[in-house]
Structures are given as C-alpha cells and as structure tokens.
Image (cartoon, helix red, strand yellow):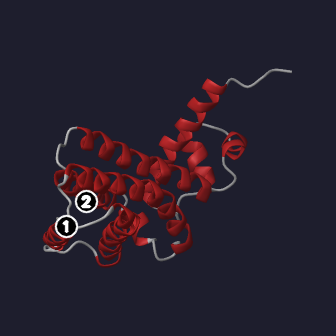
Amino acid sequence: MRRSDPAKADIVRDEILRAALGLFQTYGLDKTTMEDIAEAAGKGKSTLYYYFKKKEDVFHTVARQEMDSILETLEKGLKWTHSAGEKLRLFFQIQDNAIRNKAKLYPLIFKETKKHVAMFHSIQRESNTREIKLLKSILLEGIASGEFKGIKKEQCDAIALAGVTTLHATHLNLLLEGKTPSAEDKLAVMVDIFIKGLK
C-alpha cells in the first residue's frame, strides 16, 4: 500500500486554496461552487473533496490564512518598534489598514457578511485570542518600562479585551456602512484616548 506524500499533499492543498482565493475575490462566497474551485485549481472534484467537505470549509481556511498573514505582519512590525505606546499605535494601525485592504480585495465577500454572520463570527473568534494575547504583551511591556503608569498587571486582560473589541466594532461599522472620510480620523482619536488612559 502506497503512503501519501505529506509534502505533495501540502502543495495540492495550497493550489486549491490559491485558486479558491481568486474565485472568492472575483465572485464572492455565494456564487463560487466546489466545481468552480476544482476547475480553477486544475483538480478533480474527488481531490477537492478529499481536502474539504464543503466550500465553507475552503473559505474558512482561506480566511484563517489571511488573518495569520495580518498577525505575522503585526508581530514583525512590533519587533522594530521600541516604546509600548508606539507599539500600541502600530497594533491598531496595521489591523485597521489590513481590514480596509481586505474590504477592497473582497468587496463581494464583505457584502455577504450579513448572510453568513455565524461563519464570520466563528472566523473572527479564532483570531481574537492571538490579538488579545499580543495586545496584553504590549501593555505588560509598558508597565514594566514605566511607560504605562495608569494601569496594573491584573487589569491587562480586561484592557486588552476592550482594545480588541473597540477595533472590531470599528471594523464592523466599516463592513456594514462602508468607509467614510472620517473613519481613519475617528480611529486615531480612539487610539489617542486609549493610550492617554494608560499613561
């Protein structure tokens, strides 16, 4: 009995996901079918169904990769930033820029958000833990350096949750109502208030 080659399996899976990404960008989730994904990837339907049971599973995996990419960019950027205050600004700025860029790349997906609330909520929940953990580490760093004198270590979990929740609320507004000229300015004001409260 032949064993499957894990490296080859990863390549096939990546080819499927790249093809699906292009289709989701062009046609959205609702109008993309498993048959479309298989054809775009140059694979048979049986190959596609070996890796994914339904198109929502494919989309979930694509979305997770996109979120991982945002968080990796954020983590790399934070390594080059010195003060905790600068890191907080960068945290909010990179997250905000990323979601705005995704809204441009996936206009149809974002229009379908209301139809697939449960799925989008599930995807978002997956990234929350990492975002909160990252924001908490910045807060603790600011306390240790003496930059954030207005908070205590035991408050960091609640503050990190509040910060991430505020950012998500801003993004939800963007998804539901579209970008307004003052949206970025409003976020900058919120970040300023947030940082002043920590000092």
Q: CA distance from mark 2 to mark 1?
A: 7 Å
Decide if residue 98 is on the left or right side of residue 31.
left
The quadrant of the picture occupied by the N terminus is top right
> Among all residues in the image, which is located at the extreme top?
2
Q: Residue at x 43, y 64 (%)?
A: 109
Pick the front one: 162 or 64: 162
Q: Quadrant of residue 191?
A: bottom left
Position in image of residue 29 (x %, y %): 51, 62
Residue 190, picture quadrant:
bottom left
Label 1, secondary structure: give it: helix
Provide the secondary structure element on which disc 2 rests: helix
Name the quarter where the C terminus is drawn.
bottom left
Type of the residue with mark 2 = Phe
Left or right: where 11 falls relative to 79? right
Report if the CB atoms under discs 2 and 1 are less than 8 Å apart.
yes
Residue 134 to residue 3: above or below: below
What type is the residue that disc 1 sits on? Answer: Val
Residue at 29%, 59% in the rendered image:
104
- Residue annotated with mark 2: 92
Mark earlier in primary sequence (2, 1): 2
Neighbor class of circle 2 (other Cα within 10 Å; few <14, some 14-19, many 20+) is many
Q: Nearer the viewer, residue 169 or 162?
A: 162
Residue in view at x 53 percent, y 36 percent: 15
Residue 157 location, x and y as percent?
40, 64
Disc number placed over residue 191 in the picture, else none: 1
**Relative image position of residue 4 (x, y in whole percent):** 73, 25
Check residue 157 in the rendering and tell me which mark sits there, or answer none.
none
Residue at 31% over, 64% down? 152
